[in-house]
Image (cartoon, rainbow, N blue to C red):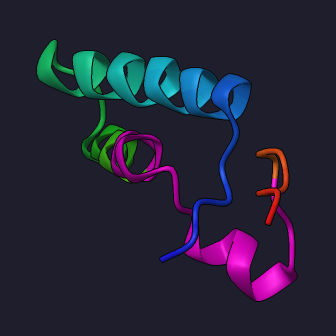
Amino acid sequence: MTKNVGTIDRAARAILGLALIAWALSGGPIWAWIGVVPLVTAAFSFCPLYSVLGLRTCPAVKA
């Protein structure tokens, strides 16, 4: 898995994921547990959807 999620993107995903999970834990709708997905993609710096679409928000690795 090559990293394809940049620093700002990771931070936004982590904040969104934590907010959704907190909402679910505080009695929010069951679908708020979808916050696990952006949290995991932020943790691994890898988004499968970005790979399919050929996107990347992290800087290119210099060889």
* x 35%, y 38%: residue: 32
Quadrant of res 53: bottom right
Observer-nearest of 26 and 12: 12
* x 34%, y 50%: residue: 40
Q: Which residues are magenta?
A: 38-56
* x 47%, y 77%: residue: 1
In this view, the residue farthest toward the bottom is: 52
31 versus 24 height, above or below:
below
3 versus 5 height, above or below:
below
The quarter of the image holding the C terminus is bottom right
Q: Main secondary structure of the magenta part?
A: helix
**Residue 26 belongs to magenta span:** no
Horizontal side, residue 48 vs residue 38: left or right: right
**Residue 44 belongs to magenta span:** yes
36 versus 62 height, above or below:
above
Could you tell me residue 37's position as x and y percent?
39, 53
Could you tell me residue 34's position as x and y percent?
37, 49
